[in-house]
Image: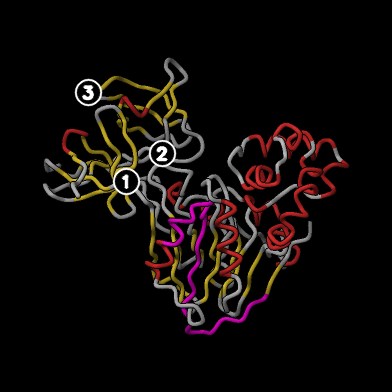
Amino acid sequence: MTCRVRQVQLESGQRVLAIGGVRGRLALLEVLLNRLQFHPGRDALVFLGDLVGGGGQNLETLHFAMDLARLPCVFFLCGDEELLPGPETGADEAVQEAWRQRLAARQDGLFWQLCAKAGLARKAALAQPAAALAAMRPKFARELDFLAAMPHILESRQYLFAHAGLGPGPLKDQDLQTVLAARGFFTGMQRGPAMPKLLTVAHWPAGWYGRTTLCHAPHYSPALKIVSADGGLGLAPGGQLNGAILRGGVYEGFAMADGLPMVRVLRSQPGRGAAVCFTGPDLRVRALRPEPGGRLCLHLASGGQMFVPEGWLCGGGEAWQLRGDAPGWFPPLAVGQTVGLAAGAGRMAMVKLGSHLGWAEWDSLAMPRG
């Protein structure tokens, strides 16, 4: 597949809002646009791919996007979640089998929602994904054409936008595996030269770049000219939908929406920890020794050690694993303060202050009234 590059005209002082990783959460997208105070015709709006995903409102989100696309200066990038099996898929059994595995792992993705609306049986659609897509085209030609026309890269005079990352060389010759699915792109670029202009990407949750704190805010390096804006919505505990705010070729800040329930602090907690956090798709650990309420663990991927609450571990023996990303932080909490509730872990709760996650004891929290 040839890399589709689109050149766009943006005003030098125009506010540019870059949103990554909606993943079918339409309600949160609407909240975020309100918090960003998006003004059509004045602001530019760029979606960095993964508009759809596992959020359950994929088709509704796609229709909302198609309406937005009629406005001036609104752009949508193709992400790996927007890819669908093409007509050539059925001619190559190896390619078709790869699609079967991909689709089987995305049981609530857009493909399956389209199948259900078109009255196609899952078993038959999984056996012949390309044929299923052809069968649904008469009903969803407009939606499929919209997805197929999404560029992989956007470029303006001051900015570059891609779903996951960029490699060396001309934009039109970029490797699509890098553009759509680069893992940990920001980390890999730390040894390379700076980008020629500000590059904003998504795909890899910004929280997975952390080693000392678990934070889902956009990751930004003015030296490298890179913003990684994916907040891990649907992929990480306490994940959020980020909207990066760009102006004049630089990153100004962000707004976010996460939809977490809020809990009230009943008992103060002194802040401590934050020496390390365990993140990423590889959450294997070695339990070193029991401690009150949990265990001291070694994270095999990073080599870090930290206390993990008992309820955040599964397995045993030599096969321990975390239930999800784990912070090493116990945030300072004051009586009456409200925080987001991200997850429970035995007698501990994972709470969120702003974009940062940490631990608190369940019995020090209460659901707010009213």
Above or below, 78 relative to 310: below
Position of 244 with respect to 198 (left or right) is left
Residue 266, position as x, y percentages in the image: 12, 41
* Residue type, label 3: Pro
Indicate whether residue 77 is drawn in magenta.
no
Identify the secondary structure beneath mark 1: strand
Image: magenta residue range: 7-30
Q: How far apart are the two marked residues, 2 and 1, measured between alpha carbons?
A: 10 Å
Report the number of numbered marks: 3
Q: Which mark is residue 325?
A: 2
Dividing the picture into quadrants, the one containing residue 111 is top right
Report the residue at 46% width, 73% height from top. 246
10 Å crowding of disc 3: few (<14), some (14-19), many (20+): few
Q: Which mark is residue 78?
A: none
* Residue type, label 1: Leu
Report the residue at 24% width, 28% height from top. 347
Q: Residue furthest top?
A: 317
- The one nearer the camera, 262 or 269, is 262
* Residue type, label 2: Asp
Q: Closer to the camera: disc 3 or disc 1? A: 1
Above or below, 161 relative to 286: below
Q: Which mark is residue 357?
A: 1
Report the residue at 79% width, 50% height from top. 86
Residue 196, position as x, y percentages in the image: 59, 72
Write down the residue under mark 3. 292
Report the residue at 31% width, 26% height from top. 296
In this figure, which colouring scheme has been used for the structure?
secondary structure
- Look at the numbered discs 2 and 1 and tell me whether their residues touch, using CB distance below 8 Å: yes
Q: How far apart are the two marked residues, 3 and 1, measured between alpha carbons?
A: 21 Å
Dividing the picture into quadrants, the one containing residue 67 is bottom right
